[in-house]
Image (spheres, rainbow, N blue to C red):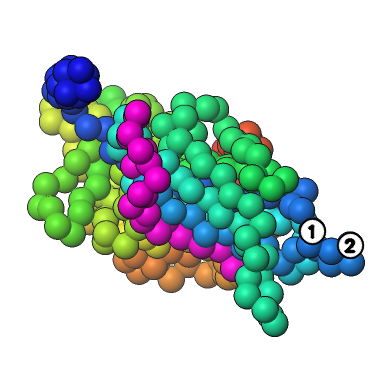
Amino acid sequence: MKTLHLIIFSVLYFKGAFAAPLDTSNVTFALSAKSLPCKDQFTQPDAYVQIYSYIKSMGADNSQKQLQVVGSTPYILNDMNPDWSEVFNFMWTRGTGQTWLIKVFDHDHVSSNDLIGSAEVSVDRFLESEGNVKVNLSHGGSITIKRVLPIAFKLSARNLPHRDRYIGSNGISDPYAIISYQDLSDDTEKEIHQTGVLTDNENPTWSDTIEFNKYIPNARQTLHIRLFDRDLFSRDEFLGEAHIKADELTEQSGNVIFPLEKSEGGASIILRMPHRQKELPTETSTDLHLTSSQPIYTPTTPESASTSNEEYIHHYDNEIHDEIPK
Ligand SMILES: [Ca+2]
Ligand SMILES: [Ca+2]
Ligand SMILES: [Ca+2]
């Protein structure tokens, strides 16, 4: 009987696998905890987290877990409500039973570190939920997993060259952008996004949010941003391009400017990044020494770290109304 079950299960599993190709993407998240239990009345825990993942199989004995390390945080001194600033990356494949095992420890200088509590979270379940997921720890208190976007931005351009030369035209281009990416391991470019066309606009700001959710840390991925002028009666014309290392973008907040290559007249693009939980870069130079792949930071207001996914997105949406450099 058990064998029969297994066969039926396998058939269903393979049917499922053929019906939908494996959906893999990078999940980025941060952690905080509330009301961690204290060992004694006088001190609060110096808490840190270790995260592992394993594949939980339905109906099977999961006591022999094959744990993979996802990452860990440093400890935060004397705080029963710690909010860790580390951002974790996890390669998620839908429907494979990936489960996080989260262990919270109290760092101890003298004796060995004590386990404060642990929790398990199904990664599929986490991704189905909107926003933050709060789970109770085994010995009191809770841990909250906050989803953060790995790379997302809105795009603007400045001083785009004029490429409309037909009679009766004011000359101003009708720009749109195509954003693609490339891995080091791979010679083929894959498109991520194409913006709409903004008619007669040399300083366009597109309203699209461009998300790069195929980001893999340290895979040396490059984003290619190419701008074109839409022409109705001839081929669209090239306006310029920028090539940006994805790993570097994950460190950026606020407006980041890149010069457009193969363009003229000081054309540039501006990537408008959400504020991050990490500290913002301190550079506030507005002196434009534009060289390839060297972003220039514009002053950003170091707002306090957002505490929920909602706020995070809220900040981000607000930024489109911020003044951007001319
Ligand atoms: Ca044209
Ligand atoms: Ca035009
Ligand atoms: Ca045109």
Image quadrant assignment for residue 237: top left
Q: Is disc 1 placed on a helix, strand or loop?
A: loop
Residue that mark 2 sits on = 41
Magenta range: 55-75
Q: Residue 292: percent from the left, percent from the top?
A: 32, 66
Image quadrant assignment for residue 109: bottom right
Q: Are marks 1 and 2 in contact (CB under 8 Å)?
A: yes
* Disc 1 packing (10 Å; few <14; some 14–19; many ≥20): some
**Residue 93 shows which numbered tag?**
none
Q: Residue at x 57, y 45 (%)?
A: 119
Q: Residue at x 46, y 60 (%)?
A: 71
Residue 58 inside the magenta-drawn segment: yes
Real-space CA distance between mark 1 and mark 2, rounded to the nearest whole angstrom: 7 Å
Work out whether residue 82 or residue 169 is closer to the camera in this orientation and state it.
82
- Tell me which secondary structure the magenta stretch mostly adopts: loop
Residue 51 inside the magenta-drawn segment: no
> For the residue marked with disc 1, what is the amino acid?
Cys
Q: Residue at x 79, y 62 (%)?
A: 39
